[in-house]
């Protein structure tokens, strides 16, 4: 059975990608940002997920105003880089996991979340910058990545609650995939930022930090934040934070916060980052199947006979059928 082991949030500010590509990460301004991800890269190298599901938003690289899917799941075998502004980044092609992605699409759509299935797509800084922050800059990305693009660019984006519930459906989908895969879900974008108009450069650290607290301990509270509140408190692009609720919905209710980092600004944007691990439940030791002894003379075989069960063929004496608990 596949399972989600952890969730991560990460910024996707395009200038972070440019700093990596132009080898400026050691400059004091960028050092401050990148230093916060040193521990995260170690955590990721140690976690070694088999698959990452990356919840991100496209910036008119794959989808223009002609086509605006609310939720688009990448089911392709690979996703080449593309970008606005600086052009395609010199990063490896993102390899997908078509089998798991198709399974998620089926499970989630039958659960009444009407995803768009995407079999050909390019991915921009919204996806590749978070991959760099968590994996560094390897020659190949170390595991397949399933992109889930969310519309947070054109009104109306999905509500935080809808995102959280989609995360829940993804969690169920992953758990019903038969192969033993360890999956990390990334929620990207955020935190407070506004990149145009009179409020450009808006940063609201109080709101951001409360959001990180909520993500860790009380995510359901965050699902009640309206679009207007996000925009008022966190700027027009602060709405990207709804994507983090898909990640959070895909985790268990109780999680362990293993790391957090917050710095302002990177370009126009507050960088907030958190790593939440699902708390591993010890699977109950199975009761050993009873040894069937032939009744010895003069003694009763068993104090309480077990009823026949269909799984045991309903034969004489039944027998104990140990079913694994989910
Ligand atoms: C910036 C941030 C973004 O999320 C984005 O998509 C573009 C620019 C910025 O802060 O410069
Ligand atoms: Fe953005």
Image (spheres, helix red, strand yellow):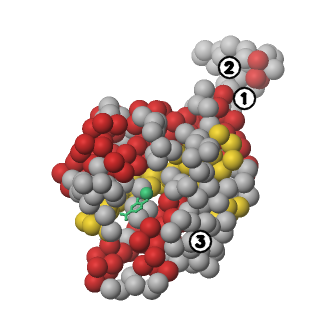
Ligand 2's quadrant is bottom left
| Quadrant of image for the C terminus | top right
Residue furthest out toward the left: 206
Q: Is residue 160 left or right of residue 206?
A: right
Which disc number belongs to residue 88? 3
According to the picture, the residue beneath numbered tag 1 turns out to be 293
Residue at 73% x, 17% y is 309
Is the residue marked 3 within 8 Å of ligand 1, measured from its CB? no
Q: Quadrant of residue 267?
A: bottom left
| Quadrant of image for the N terminus | top right
Residue furthest out toward the front: 198
Residue at 56% x, 66% y is 83
Against 172, residue 260 (above or below) is below
User: Of marks 3 and 1, which one's residue comes earlier in the chain?
Assistant: 3
- Depth check: give the residue in front, 318 or 68: 68
Against 274, residue 163 (above or below) is above
- Asked whether the viewer can see residue 129, the reply is yes
Identify the secondary structure beneath mark 2.
Answer: loop
Residue at 28% x, 79% y is 29
According to the picture, the residue beneath numbered tag 2 turns out to be 301
Judged by depth in the image, the label closer to the viewer, 3 or 2, is 3
- Mark 2 and 1 residues: CB-CB less than 8 Å, in contact? yes
Identify the secondary structure beneath mark 1.
Answer: loop
Work out how far the residue at label 3 is from the one at label 1, CA to CA, in angstroms. Answer: 71 Å
Q: Residues within 10 Å of mark 3 (few under 14, many from 20)?
A: some
Q: Quadrant of residue 89?
A: bottom right
- Mark 3 and 1 residues: CB-CB less than 8 Å, in contact? no
- Mark 3 and 2 residues: CB-CB less than 8 Å, in contact? no
User: Of marks 2 and 1, which one's residue comes earlier in the chain?
Assistant: 1
Judged by depth in the image, the label closer to the viewer, 3 or 1, is 3
Q: Residues within 10 Å of mark 1 (few under 14, many from 20)?
A: few
Work out how far the residue at label 3 is from the one at label 2, CA to CA, in angstroms. Answer: 75 Å
């Amino acid at each position: 059975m596949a399972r989600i082991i952890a969730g991560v949030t990460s910024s996707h500010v395009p200038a972070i990608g440019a700093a990596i590509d132009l080898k400026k990460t050691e400059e004091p301004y960028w050092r401050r940002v990148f230093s916060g991800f040193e521990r995260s890269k170690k955590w990721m190298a140690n976690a070694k997920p088999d698959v990452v599901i990356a919840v991100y938003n496209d910036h008119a690289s794959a989808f223009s105003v002609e086509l605006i899917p609310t939720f688009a799941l990448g089911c392709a075998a690979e996703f080449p880089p593309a970008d606005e502004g600086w052009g395609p980044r010199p990063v490896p092609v993102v390899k997908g996991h078509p089998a798991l992605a198709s399974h998620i699409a089926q499970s989630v759509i039958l659960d009444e979340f009407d995803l768009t299935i995407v079999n050909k797509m390019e991915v921009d800084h919204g996806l590749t910058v978070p991959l760099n922050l968590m994996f560094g800059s390897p020659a190949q990305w170390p595991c397949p990545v399933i992109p889930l693009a969310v519309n947070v660019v054109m009104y109306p984006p999905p509500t935080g609650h809808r995102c959280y519930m989609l995360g829940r459906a993804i969690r169920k989908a992953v758990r019903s995939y038969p192969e033993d895969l360890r999956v990390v879900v990334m929620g990207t974008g955020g935190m407070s930022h506004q990149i145009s108009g009179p409020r450009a450069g808006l940063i609201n650290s109080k709101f951001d930090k409360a959001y990180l607290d909520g993500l860790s301990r009380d995510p359901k509270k965050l699902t009640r934040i309206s679009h207007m509140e996000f925009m008022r408190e966190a700027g027009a692009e602060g709405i990207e934070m709804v994507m983090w609720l898909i990640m959070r919905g895909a985790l268990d209710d109780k999680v362990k916060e293993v790391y957090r980092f917050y710095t302002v600004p990177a370009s126009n944007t507050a960088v907030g980052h958190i790593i939440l691990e699902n708390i591993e439940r010890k699977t109950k030791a199975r009761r050993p199947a009873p040894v069937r002894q032939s009744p010895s003379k003069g003694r009763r075989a068993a104090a309480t006979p077990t009823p026949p069960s269909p799984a045991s063929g309903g034969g004489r004496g039944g027998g104990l059928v140990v079913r694994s608990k989910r």
